[in-house]
Image (cartoon, rainbow, N blue to C red):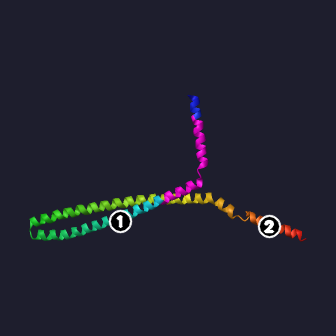
């Protein structure tokens, strides 16, 4: 058994080494940048949706509070007229409006907390994206610099320079 285990480990290590050599860091970094950029776009969309939900809930709460103010005036009229039947009806509507205002306020607060969490995730993702892009630039920079370096000449340039040198020396 130990021989088979050792052989399995050896084959596994060789396969891992082969895969490491096959994988190109630049391609992996580019893919990571694309995936992270897509994830950030999804986070922004979700944050926008949460902001719209928060606004909607705040408007709902404001509407319920305005209705409460009107119902308070109506309740004052009913109590002044000593009409308990109508007052009960207004109190029932007032309780409903209070519940709606409370629910809307809680939903707006929940949306605000979720938006804050998403904002923290987005900032962390943007920091990571910046780090990955910097690493990608660092990885690709030597290749670009080597191609653009003045010391590196095309074969045709070398041939032309050689011909000029031969002609100059022949003309002496």
Instruction: Name the one closer to the observer, 89 or 164.
Output: 164
Along the horizontal axis of the image, is 80 left or right of 106? Answer: left
What secondary structure do most residues of the magenta stretch adopt?
A: helix
In percent of the image, x 31 and y 60: which residue is there?
107
Q: Which residue is mark 2?
A: 161
Image location of residue 47, percent across then percent down? 40, 62
In percent of the image, x 46 and y 60: which residue is there?
40
In percent of the image, x 20 and y 70: which residue is there?
70
The stretch of residues the image draws in magenta is 8-37
Instruction: Name the one closer to the observer, 50 or 4.
Output: 4
Whichever of labels 1 and 2 marks the residue nearer the N terminus, that label is 1
Disc 2, SS? helix
Image location of residue 5, percent across then percent down? 56, 32
Alpha-carbon distance for marks 1 and 2? 68 Å
**Numbered mark located on residue 146 in the image:** none
Along the horizontal axis of the image, is 150 left or right of 94? Answer: right
Residue 17 shown in magenta: yes
Along the horizontal axis of the image, is 22 left or right of 93? Answer: right
Instruction: Name the one closer to the observer, 133 or 91.
Output: 133
Residue 27 shown in magenta: yes
Asked whether the beta carbons under mark 1 and mark 2 sit within 8 Å of each other, the answer is no
Mark 1 vs mark 2, foreground winner is 2
Q: Is residue 20 above or below residue 69?
A: above
Extreme residue in the top direction = 1
Extreme residue in the right direction = 172
Label 2: how many Cα within 10 Å (few below 14, some 14–19, many 20+): few
Along the horizontal axis of the image, is 89 left or right of 144? Answer: left
Image location of residue 12, percent across then percent down? 57, 39
Q: Which residue is mark 1?
A: 52
């Amino acid at each position: 058994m130990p021989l088979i285990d050792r052989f399995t480990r050896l084959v596994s290590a060789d396969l891992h080494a082969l895969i490491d050599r096959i994988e190109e860091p630049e391609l992996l970094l580019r893919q990571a940048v694309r995936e992270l950029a897509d994830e950030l776009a999804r986070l922004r969309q979700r944050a926008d949706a949460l902001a719209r939900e928060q606004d909607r809930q705040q408007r709902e709460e404001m509407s319920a509070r305005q209705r409460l103010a009107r119902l308070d005036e109506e309740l004052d009229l009913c109590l002044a007229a000593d009409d308990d039947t109508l007052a009960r009806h207004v109190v029932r509507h007032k309780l409903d409006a209070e519940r709606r205002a409370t629910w809307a306020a809680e939903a707006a607060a929940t949306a605000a907390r979720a938006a804050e969490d998403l904002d923290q995730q987005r900032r962390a993702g943007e920091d990571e994206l910046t780090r990955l892009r910097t690493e990608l630039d660092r990885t690709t920079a030597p290749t670009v610099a080597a191609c653009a370096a003045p010391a590196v000449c095309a074969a045709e340039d070398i041939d032309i320079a050689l011909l000029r040198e031969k002609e100059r020396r022949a003309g002496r």
